[in-house]
Structures are given as C-alpha cells and as structure tokens.
Amino acid sequence: MKPDVIFILENAGWPALLLDGSGTILRANPAAAETFGPAMQGEAPLLSAIWSPENGIKPEQFLALWGQAPAGRTALKFLVRGGGTGMFSISICTFNLGLEKFFVLQATPEPGAAGTANHQPLEASLAQKQRLDCALRLARTVSLDFNNALTSILGHVSLLLGKAEPGHPWRRSLIGVEKSAQRAAEISNELAAFSRQELEAPRAAPGNLNAVVNRCVDFFRNASGTATTWNLQLEQNLFAARFDEAKLQQALTKVLENAVEAVPGGGQITLQTRNLELKVPTQDQNVHLAAGTFVCVEITDNGCGIGPDVLPRIFEPFFTTKGKTHRGIGLALVYGIVSNHGGGLAVSGQPGAGTSVRIYLPAERTLADAGAGVGGNLHGTETVLVVDDEMLLLSMTETILTEFGYKILTASSGQKALAILARQDVKVDLVVTDLVMPGMSGRELVDRIRQVAPATRILCMSGYGLPADKRPGVPFLRKPFTSMQLLAKIKRVISANLGVDE
C-alpha cells in the first residue's frame, strides 16, 4: 500500500525516503536519487539495496527496533552512487495510516561522506593541497609585484594627463596607456582575490559622490586650456552610496570629456548632485527607477546637443559621430559601469541646446561622510614620509607629491623610516607605508610608530584590498591608484577626515 500523502521533503537538499515497515522505499526525493544512484530506480526499491553490511543489522530489523524505541539521531552507512560507501547522520519520524506504520528517513551526509571509491588516497590529497598552496603563494607574489608596477604607471600617467591640454598630440596615447593599466589592474585584483581564496568581492564601503565629482572637475580644470566655465551645485547633505571609486571616476571622466568636446570654444558645464526619495517607480528617458532612495549627479553643457536620430543609439558599442579615429565605446563603458552598480544612466538633449547626462545610484538614507568631499585644491605643504621597498613606487610618489607642494622624505624599509622619525630636525606630518615589506612589515612599523610618535598620522597602502589584520584606526589606500586618488586620500588624512576602510 502506497500512502496517499504529500511528501513535504520532496525539494529538500538532503536525501529523504518514505518507507513502510518492511523496508520498501515508497518515495524518494531527488536528492536521494542523486546520492544513491540506480538503486533508487524501479517500482518499489528496497532499503536493503543501499544498506551497508557494515551497519551490523538488517534494515527491516533496524526499523522495527526504531519503531519500538525511537532515538534522536544515529549514524548509518549507505551504498552511494559510484560504488562507494558513505556515512550519514540519520533521523526518522513515524506515522500511522490505519493499522500500518510508515517511516520518514532523512539522511544528512557526515564530513567525508562521499563514497570511498571516490576518495583520493591521503598521499594524493596532500600532494594536491601542496600544489594548490604553491599556486596561491605564486599568485600572491605575482599580484604584489604587478600591482606595484601598475601603481607607478598609473601615478605617472595620471600626472601627465593632468598637465596635457585637450589638443596635445600625446594625450590620446596617454589615455590609452591609462586605460590599459586600469584593465591590467582589474586582472591583478582578480589574481589577488584568487590568492586569498575569496568567493566574492568585498562590498564597497559607503562613499560620498561629491568627492568623486570634485576630483574629476579638478582634473579637467588643471588640464583644460579653454575658457570653460565650471558650475558646481553640490548637495551638502548628500546621501551615502556604495560604489567602486576608481570605476565611477572613470565613468564621470568619460562623460566630462564629452561635455568638454561639446563646448570647444569655451562654454558652461554644470554639475549638480541631489538626493532622490521615490515613493513610486519613475521613468527618466530609458531608465526605469524603482521606488527607493537614490543619489543623482547631473552633468549639463550648453554645447552642440544631440539630434533625435542619434540619441537612441548613443549607448551602442562602436557607434560614434566623432569620425573614424574614435571607437565609440565611451558611453557604452559608462552605461556598463553604472548598471553594474545597480544604477541607471539617462541622456537628453536637443541640437544646439546642449546635453544633460544623469547618473543614478542606489543610496542609503544616511548622510555621506562630509570629509569625503575634499576636492578642488589638492595641494599641500606638509611633510610626508613615504615607506616602500619598491624604488619605482618611492620615485613615483615623490614626483607626484612634490609637484603638488608637499615636502617628501622616503625610506625603503621600516628601520630606515624609524631612523628618520627619530631625528630632531625633522617633523613628519604623515607616514605613508606599504603593508607588505621584507624585514619589518608595514603592520609592525605602524605599531612601532604608535609607540615612539603616537600623534603621527599614518596611511597604509597595499595591493590586497582591505587586510583582515589591518591596524584599527589607520586609513587604507588600495593599490594600484591614480595620482588624484593618492592626493585626495592624503588630503583627507591630513585634514583628519579619515576614510579608514576605503
């Protein structure tokens, strides 16, 4: 007799069987069929078909004893798909229909419950682990060296771009180098994530969109030789949003490049940030915004505008109206970055009446860190001690910070840094140190500085994201970074507006 009941464990992720008193399997869920294999096939398979002789008792005897004296859980061995034996933790409940008793058996695999036929010998398992450990160490080393080289490249290139006018013959090549380095940085970060065996990227910390806007505008103000007027209307109580700062800066830079090209003789470009709290879903051009909280940055120029025949195609990869020398991937790239952040990108314009680009990002109803809005003036006069065992990075950092007015001291090791800090004729305002160095690590250096000069501000940098053992209360900058990111972070730390987890 097969009971007319709904087997509520049909979709359970672990094997579950419905049995009668004789050990006949009346129902088996898909997890049981997958675990125990062909033995589950047929009109009425028996529990004995998957029962291991190592249990020391026949299945029908076991069920009879359980019916008389139910236990909490017990361990049993079953024959699994592939011919092996697996150990399972068993729980059973019983119910009666008329005079007949039925059993619902649930089997949770114990650690190492895969069939013994599929188990690797211990020696082979250890050898495989050693190979994986070697691969992880190699990936970590390569990622570290690669990140250091990329940091130097990005730092120098972004500094040169800040000095090259829009029409400079080398500007296009420099932009190409920067984009290639940024792509290489993504690969390096993926390699670093593999070396840490991360299953997913860490969630971005809440940030202030005003900070990114300020840095991008500052970059174009320094680079532009035209009479462009920049009008910033930034919401002072802006909501916090989670975003990848480097990628969002890349997106905004591309939009601003288009705006500058649209006003070649000198026009006005306005950037406005604002909070949005939508009670109902809202449509803006091609963007559908769900009800919720957003921040928006709108970039408007009074340039040539966009025709109605062009507007529907602006997000198409390789579509361009700028001639054969342009690949037409700019707005497609911006669209991808914004979409990957869960946001939306809307563009509107009329021929001869300018263009407006609106970037929407999901936000939290908490105010963004006001200190993150440092921008405009990234120059300084303070003394900065840079500590890194890579001479390329020391040279690059010294070049950038000196260019922006800072007094720079460098040390290639923690011991040399401490010797500089001990000098009576030197007052160091900020120590910028790498975390991974031979001899004395950056973490050890931080601890020593806190002992000998506890008032000294410290900024740590590394190519491995936010380390789990990073010293609390110490701001962090991830390699590789651009010159603008380095300058903005140093400005914030010196101003005591600490973005500890960025």
Image: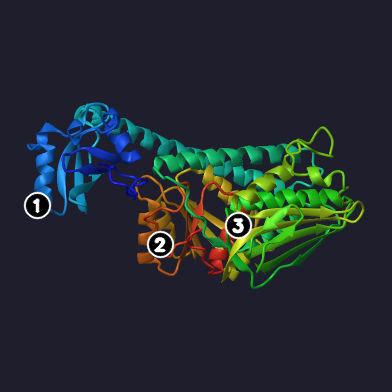
Residue pointed to by mark 3 = 487
Q: Could one spot residue 405 in this view of the protein?
A: no
Q: Residue at x 51, y 66 (%)?
A: 498
- Which one is in front in this view, the residue at disc 3 or the one at disc 1? 1
What amino acid does circle 2 point to?
Answer: Ala
Which of the pair 43/200 is nearer the observer? 43
Of helix, strand and loop, which one carries label 2?
A: loop
Q: Within 10 angstroms of label 3, few (less than 14), some, or many (20 or more) residues?
A: many
Quick check: 253 above or below 149?
A: below
Furthest-left residue in this view: 56
Q: Residue at x 41, y 45 (%)?
A: 198
What amino acid does circle 3 point to?
Answer: Leu
- Which one is in front in this view, the residue at disc 1 or the one at disc 2? 1
Q: Residue at x 60, y 53 (%)?
A: 342
Q: Position of residue 26 (x, y in %)?
A: 27, 40
Of helix, strand and loop, which one carries label 3?
A: helix
Q: Quadrant of residue 123?
A: top left
